[in-house]
Amino acid sequence: MALLEVKNLKTYFFTKEGIVKAVDGNSFSLEEGEILGIVGESGAGKSITGFSILNLIDEPGKIVDGEILFNGIDLTKLNAKEFEKIRGDEIAMVFQDPETSLNPVITIGTQLMETLLYHNTLLSNKEAYSKSVKMLKQVGLPSAEKRMQSYPHELSGGMKQRVVIAIALLNNPKLLIADEPTTALDVTIQAQILYLMKKLSSDFGSSLIFITHDIAVVSQLCDKIAVMYAGKIVEYGSRDEIIFDPKHPYTKGLIACLPKLEDSDQKRLYQIPGIMPSLLHLPTGCYFKDRCELADEECNVYPKKQLLGERILFCHKV
Amino acid sequence: MKIRNRFLTEFFEDKSATVGFILFILFLIIAIAPSLFAYQNPYDLTQIYLHDSFQPPNHSFILGTDEQGRDIYSAILYGLSTSLYVGIASTIFSVAIGFSAGLISGYYGGWIDTIIMRIADIQLSFPAILIALIIMALWGGGINKIIIAITIVSWVYYARTARGIMLLEKEKEYVQSAKALGMHNFNIIFTEIMPNATAAIIVIATVRIAYAIVLEATLSFLGVGVPITEPSLGTLISNGYQVLFSGYWWSSLFPGITLMVLIISINLIGDRMRDMMNPRLER
């Protein structure tokens, strides 16, 4: 049985302007120890997918349909109390901006220890302290004991993100959701953090959902990739299939956008024409048709799910 | 510890704030143990002699006496004690109530927010002194009652500030991440967000202690405050005021000056803290 199985998840936002279908009928699954990458443009519903798993959707948003089976338990049916036990303990999350995801007026040590003590009431302060220091060392923070007394503003961005990852991994979660954890960092630090996350998830045996807009990042890190466009998954399969043999025109476009080292004649980077439609005014038919070179009459109907071996695809033109 | 030291060093860089601080500490010491500094206990009728009444300041009564022969200097020390007690106690209670009400109101929003904030709005639309007067007129005087009355009129200021800070803080990612770590709302409000709002509340509280003392003095002056048997500075001023135009200026003037210096010292501290907390002011 898969660790996480999301079936036909629909998260809608009921705004004054209309219903925003941020996540519209997506399904994916994750085995233990696997890394899934969710790629897409800003506003494609990647983060909302992550938040939906943890049920952190605020008003006016709501999960309207679908199942999220975690270890066989449907998370959408849990009440607030049961959910608090799962959050931070079995499922943890790393947020985009390390500058703001740590509480600015509480020391790093206290923030680590309170996460531990919150879920393990039997733990003594001393044990929590030594466990926290150990975890800080594991995420590669230099002089960990000294850092326990530091406030977040005394650390650099990369160090803060390491602390955030340490907090997330403290209770040895089975699933870690990382929402663009490297976007706010510069490129060299990005690579370190990526390597760290990959190493830690295999050390701890945690599964990882990695949300990003950067297909280059997922190609290095993930076992499976889901490409999202305007709230829907358009292509979903193993890393090798998606990166080396993309079928959906959008995935092809994303990969074509990457600069290529071997091709020195390339003057300009490829760009997918147009912008993603607003989720409030989605076109009828395939959402990608206005930007797609292959689009024709047929594309005025939203494509049905196709199975190509393990890969799932939504396109008429394949 | 490092941060606290830096805070103190910066605080004392300002001369007037330092003077205010020293004065306030002095007042505080006197208020805690007025009997150590006073010649007589002004409440003990056996120590007061009627034939000493209305003595102008002289070598045995340095600030003169009132119509009952009570030493004004001693009465001021005891009055200071009452005034500071009322001011600080009512501020502590109103911070406790206002701070939590504001945080809860801002965090949950919806009908909780509407109820708490509409009560606050209604209260703010009347002058504080009027509300306090009504409460005191209905209940009668007494130190505990005046503390409750001042608490009722001043929690609003903390509630509004706390709510404003909460609205700003609750959108920040550390709150989301606390939620993602499985904390429940109560803990998020009081262990995660509250420390972020404390600085602003401390500044307001310092300034509002002065307001609370003045409010108490005003109520006592108007005759609905503390009873004459436990005079505060306001009662003393009121007492002396009745005979002010008969030439007995000392029994009203000296309590008045004391109150003024007390309020100024608190305000100097409050102003300095406000300046230090305000990132927009160049220092």
Image: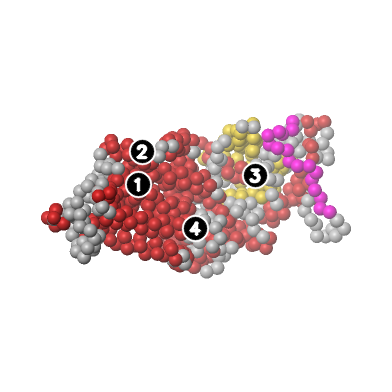
Q: For the residues labelled 1 and 4, say whether their Cβ atoms are less than 8 Å apart.
A: no
The answer as to whether the residues below labels 1 and 3 share one chain is: no
Which chain letter matches label 3? A
Q: Which is more N-terminal, label 4 or label 1?
A: 1
Give the quarter of the figure containing the N terminus of chain A: top right
- Cα–Cα span, label 3 and label 4: 44 Å
The answer as to whether the residues below labels 3 and 4 share one chain is: no
Mark 1 vs mark 3: give the one in front.
1
| Element marked by disc 4 | helix
| Element marked by disc 1 | helix
**Residue occupied by mark 3:** A46
- Residue B183 visible in rendering: no
Q: Measured from the top left, where is residue A268 in percent x and y?
A: 84, 54
The residue under the point 39% across, 57% down is B264
The residue under the point 57% across, 36% down is A60
Mark 3 vs mark 2: give the one in front.
2
Q: Is residue A173 magenta?
A: no
Which chain letter matches label 4? B
**Residue occupied by mark 4:** B275
| Element marked by disc 3 | helix
Q: Measured from the top left, where is residue B250 in percent x and y?
A: 27, 56
- Cα–Cα span, label 1 and label 4: 25 Å
Residue A55 — which label?
none
Which chain letter matches label 1? B
